[in-house]
Image (spheres, rainbow, N blue to C red):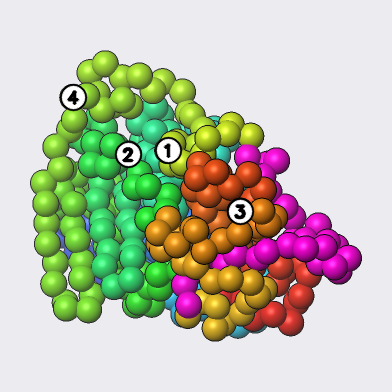
Amino acid sequence: MSGIEFTSEEQERYSRHFVLPDVGVEGQSKLKAARVLIVGAGGLGSPVALYLAAVGVGTIGIVDHDVVSLSNLQRQILYSSADVGKSKALVARERILSLNPTLKVVVYQERLDSSNALGILREFDIIADCTDNFPTRYLINDACVLASKVNVYGSVFRHEGQVSVFDASHGPCYRCLYPAPPPPELVQDCAQAGVLGVLTGIVGTLQANEIIKQTLGNGKSLAGRLLMVDALNATTQEIAVEKDPACPVCGENRSITLLIDYEEFCMGNSSPDKDSSQFEISVKELKQRLGQGQSIALLDVREPFEQQLCSLGGQLIPLRELDQRKEELNRESEIIVYCHHGMRSQSAVNLLRRSGFSNVKNLDGGIDAWAREIDKSMPRY
């Protein structure tokens, strides 16, 4: 690649690549010219960022609006105990540059959404989907299709992971594999279901490998293939993924030409109201009302092991059991439902309202918001 020069320091840094026939000077020049965006600087984003930095990807973008928490450190190797409470994006940039100061690192301390996604993605060649939720996953996919970007996807759940490459110009996109998200009541994040710490390293490293191959133009891509990893049993499985002619975003008669409301899409039909804010209560308002001695029935829809970690009290009915056990609740009482972050409790509120419970609200932000804003001595997980 003409026009790319390497300093003496870079020549030594990348010496093992220069002598590798599949990379060489030309390949290292491609890596130096590459622009890769990592969406989510967590368990998957950590190894992706570190290895892309190590191999010399010239421009790395980081999108993450969150801060480092102690529970992240079990798998998010970009961070240390001293980083707890700091911006993930800013710490990630500092860590990347400490590993390789020759790079350019662009950070976006904001949540990726339909208003900013296309503008951010257009600045990069390859997008690494290192997220942990369905709304952002579908957003990234659709934005990549609309902006003609390659999407290197990874996900983890407990001890199982998935990796693939979605390039709609030459094959399937994520919607071809998963046309619609699972019902919200069946979705669990890492905090609810747990994840084997080392699994994020395995899957993230595989993502980094696909990004490097895509940049170099070498090897066999995972495009059109889904690689599934079972870390507990040390097995892998591969399935073919075909382009869906009826796909709404990359198919022959596409209906999606603009980014949509992905939170609403991933909630499916579980929300009967367009404006659910009237059925929410903030942690500050709940604290005030409890302090006034108002009669409120608290309903905890987390799992029993979560209740043992911390609790606001009230009746425990896990969300998965709520439909069968809802008659245990008093329909005349005002019911405030809470979970970890407010997603399961929102599904619970929708279920109860469809079942005729008229005076029920969701605790916005869940017990985690209570621990952050009201009782800072409460354990967070």
Specify the amino acid type for callout 3: Arg
Q: CA distance from mark 1 to mark 4?
A: 23 Å
The quadrant holding residue 323 is bottom left
Describe residue 108's horizontal placement relative to residue 236 as left or right: right
Specify the amino acid type for callout 2: Ala
Residue 325 has which mark?
A: none
Q: Is 356 placed above or below 255 here?
A: below
Residue at 61%, 53% (x, y): give it. 331
**Would residue 88 be visible to someone looking at this image?**
no
Q: Secondary structure at mark 3?
A: loop
Residue at 27%, 64% (x, y): give it. 161
Residue at 72%, 52% (x, y): give it. 281
Describe residue 257's horizontal placement relative to residue 62 as left or right: left
Check if residue 263 falls in the magenta segment. no
- Please report whichever mark, 1 or 4, sits nearer to the chain's N-terminal start: 4
Provide the residue span drawn in magenta. 276-304
